[in-house]
Amino acid sequence: MPLLGSADPIAIVGAAATPVGRLAPRRGEPTEQLEHEVLAEVVLRALDDAGIGNRDVGSAVFTLPPANTLQLGFATFMCARLGLRCTGQVAEVVEMGITGGLAFDQAAADVSLGHADFALALGVSFQSAMPAADAMEGSIRVVGDVDFQSPFGLTPISWYAFDAARYLHDTGASREDLAAIAVKSRQHAAHNELAQFGDPLTVDDVLNARPIVEPLGLFDVPAIADGAICLVLARESTARATGKAFVTVRGRGFYHEGFHQVGDVPGDITAFPAARRATDAAMDRAGIQLADLDLAEIYAPCTITEVLVSEALDICPRGQGGAAARDGETAIGGHLPLNTSGGCLARGHPPSLTALYGLLELRQQLLHTAGPRQVNDARLGLHLCELGNYNAALAHVVEGPQ
Amino acid sequence: MSLAIIGMPGDRPLAPRVTRFTAQFWDALAEGRFLVTRCKACHQKSFPPQAHCKSCLGCDIDWIELGGRGRLYSATRVHAGPARFAAALPYSVGIVDLDDGVRLATRLLGNAGPEHLDQPVQLVVTRYQDGPLFAAELVAPDASIP
């Protein structure tokens, strides 16, 4: 039976997405489009990209729409509108930031197991119409124990602020070092037509922005964003028959360290062991090492998060993640470019879809269709997504056409 | 070992649910005592308290009282929060490592922030009109030993 990393691996054979940004109707203004209308256009483009029709699709794994989405039963509702007749599954999946990765994994498993010839990993997220203060009413119940932590008002990014405060305290790195990530992200996004923020940003802009969760300011954290995306998956043998260009998944790894945000035993919260474990597992499966990678797209909602992942994976030494971005080592043209899309801070961060957008970026880079932000001769890419405070991580190694 | 009890205005922004089991924690907290559970078999402490040991899954557990002294492991001031916390903005939260070897996340009193890491803190009871929560506050170094 074919499995990930096997002789007949999973291929991404089609994809489409909207730019990340504001898609949701503004309150008091005429409704331009609703979630299902936007996603339907994206799916039609993705199927066209893969060279297949609706009756070729055997599984449709959706990311769970955010809580403010009025249409429930969203998966079968969409399948009905798209004329799909699925043999594998129709489902909505969710677990915090790893949600898009789970949709991808579940779609991959269906084609791998032979439940479907083609499977969609897809989703739409309209959140921009909801005030952040209202959205956080729900999110504080996600990122904490509702009875023993949420009553203190621990917002999702307050956990990354804890990482940042401790990291700066322990390493002697500065807020300027963190700001280098935000500046680099904008530089990458300037050449990404899907990006929410392509305008340049200076270190001073980042340092002088209003505080959000100290020591992180406005440009250290992601903005609210909408998006819609669809990836089409198949086994490599099936993908080959379409005659279309495709990339393949060569390895996959997952690890949950067993904590929900924070454990009750003292330890280093900035070490991100799950990122390392998941990545090592994926690279082992692919038979490669870090030095073999040409780029990595990593789920990093805040500046500090990219710094900590780059250090957890030994891409740069402890305390040097920000400096590596400033010196260009993790920028396009550098030793190992990270988040060539612009990442959560500039490409944008609709949380349930971010992993799918990251995989889309790898596909563009590995097919050499990334335009001015193309990484030269890119052949192997790493994708990493996470949940909580990197309590769990999911990694995929993706390879371009042979 | 009794914790100081500090009166707070109004109700808790978000009130914890209390079960037959966790009532033992909240009832003790209201009297100034901070309890965690400990497995009788493997001595693993758990906070939040739970009726079984997450290490060995043993169900024979003790409630033990902690002194509430510790150090501030990390901290942030939250300037953008949920609607129900709007009146408290900006507010401070932190991760506290208690001397008894237990880590927890909680509200910080006295505007503590990232500049106070590793400083000694003390748990206190915050008594709202609708019930208790706990919080941590910085301890002046010369007051750390009574």
Image: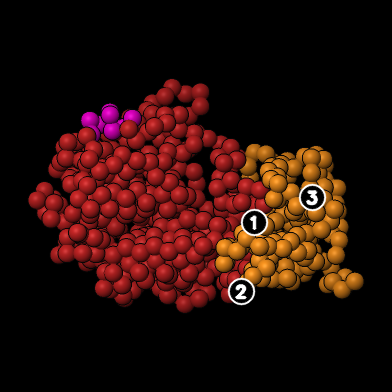
Chain colours: A red, B orange
Residue A41 located within the stretch drawn in magenta:
no
Q: How many badges with numbers are in the image?
A: 3
Q: Is residue B2 visible?
A: yes
Q: Is residue A119 above or below residue A28?
A: below
Q: Nearer the viewer, mark 1 or mark 2?
A: 1
Q: What main secondary structure does the magenta stretch of the protein show?
A: helix
Asked if marks 3 and 2 fall on the same chain, the answer is: no
Q: Residues within 10 Å of mark 2 (few under 14, many from 20)?
A: few
Q: Is residue A372 visible?
A: no
Query: Residue B8, position in %: x, y?
Result: 82, 46
Residue under numbered circle 2: A170
**Upstream in sequence: badge 3 or badge 1:** 3
Residue under numbered circle 3: B27
**Part of the protein shown in magenta:** A77-84
* Chain of residue at mark 3: B
Marks 3 and 1: CB-CB under 8 Å?
no
Query: Residue A189, position in %: x, y?
Result: 38, 53
